[in-house]
Image (cartoon, grey):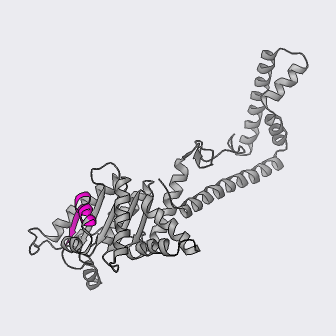
Amino acid sequence: MPYDANVLRRASQRLEDQSRQRRERTDRLRLEAYEREPRLEQLDRRLRGTMAGLVAAALRQGGDPVAAVQSVRRENQELQQERAVLLGGLGLPEDALDDRPACPLCRDTGWQGAKMCRCLKQLCAQEQIRELSKLLNLGEQSFDTFRIDYYSQSIYPGQGISPRENMEQNFNICWNYATKFGRVAIKNLLLSGAPGLGKTFLSACIARAVSESGFSVVYDTAVNIFSQFEARKFLRDSRDGLDARDETRRYLNCDLLILDDLGSELTTQFTQSALYEVINTRLVGERHTVISSNLSIGEVAQRYAPQIASRLDGEYHTLEFFGDDIRLLKKNRL
């Protein structure tokens, strides 16, 4: 799950800040407890002495190591019992002054060896949703808030089914794709149809659900994506060129790329080459992609190179959208 470097940095900083704040709260509580009950500080100093150090001291005096260990254990148990009684008298649990990590798996480091811990993954997912929300307004867009009642139940000309029935099918496919991400046969989706029919909304729903499951998700428009590939090529070693190189890596390597509004870009030989690189690299790497476009399937085939059309036709599951513009219907109901 190659999270964006900025997402990982912010999540790691949050994890570090949370750990630091817990330590500071425990330190303040410890000082208050010591002030109210000075004997606690004496007990803690005794308990902080290591078993090895206490046994070594016993051995230096010529004692039996087994007996020394047993003696130290008894002494520690007695000290802990006394400490628990004193803490109870202050209305505190016996572990109130202990420096305990919030995550016992990684001890708040965020990593278990080279593997990212689930606590850091959760923070990365939250930061990723914040990043996506800058473009997608994810505060309102989710599968739970989808409104099927905006779609007509009348048979749509030339389709044989109603927009509502079609949208119910599209919704179910998108819901399964997102909530069972990586575990369904469909790896890639092409959402095709006129503006205002819910393509971006369902893309946002997919982005939210997949992000919340702990996968890396990148959403961007076709225009922005192709401009980054252009900067990578023509600006090369400049600051903008280096930034563009990082951005294009995100597009190529994230678990899920959502490429919105394909066809809105000025289609040139370069943009066709960039689109082919995105599609082909992600197919070879077995990474998932969702593409939305206002173009019909026929228009997609006419506009893009045969290699691109072939891959979209053969490797993407196409969902067609038709009906009345939902944005206008919502506006008229206000």
Q: Nearer the viewer, residue 165 or 185?
A: 185
Relative height, residue 189 to residue 32 (above, below): below
Residue at 16% in and 65% down: 165
Rendered-image quadrant of the C terminus = bottom left
Image quadrant where residue 14 sits: bottom right
The answer to whether 28 appears left or right of 125 in the picture is: right
Give residue 69's quadrant in the image: top right
Indicate the position of residue 307 as horizontal and vertical percent values. 27, 64
Q: Is residue 277 magenta?
A: no
Measured as percent of width and height from the top left, residue 105 is found at: 58, 42
Q: Residue at x 83, y 38 (%)?
A: 45
State left or right for residue 65 relative to residue 113. Answer: right
Total labels drawn: 0
Determine the image quadrant of residue 257. Answer: bottom left
The residue most toward the right is 61
Q: Is residue 129 left or right of residue 322?
A: right
**Is 252 displayed left or right of 311 in the figure?**
right
Q: From the viewer's perspective, is residue 215 above or below residue 106?
A: below
The answer to whether residue 141 is visible is no
| Residue 223 percent location from the top left of the image | 39, 76
Mark yes or no: residue 182 visible.
yes
Residue 313 is covered by the magenta coloring:
yes
What residue is at 17 percent from the left and 66 percent from the top?
Answer: 166
Q: Locate residue 333, reporting x and y percent.
A: 26, 83
Outermost top residue: 64
Question: Residue at point 50% right, 60% down?
Answer: 126
Highlighted range, magenta: 307-322
Identify which residue, 202 or 309, lies in the foreground.
309
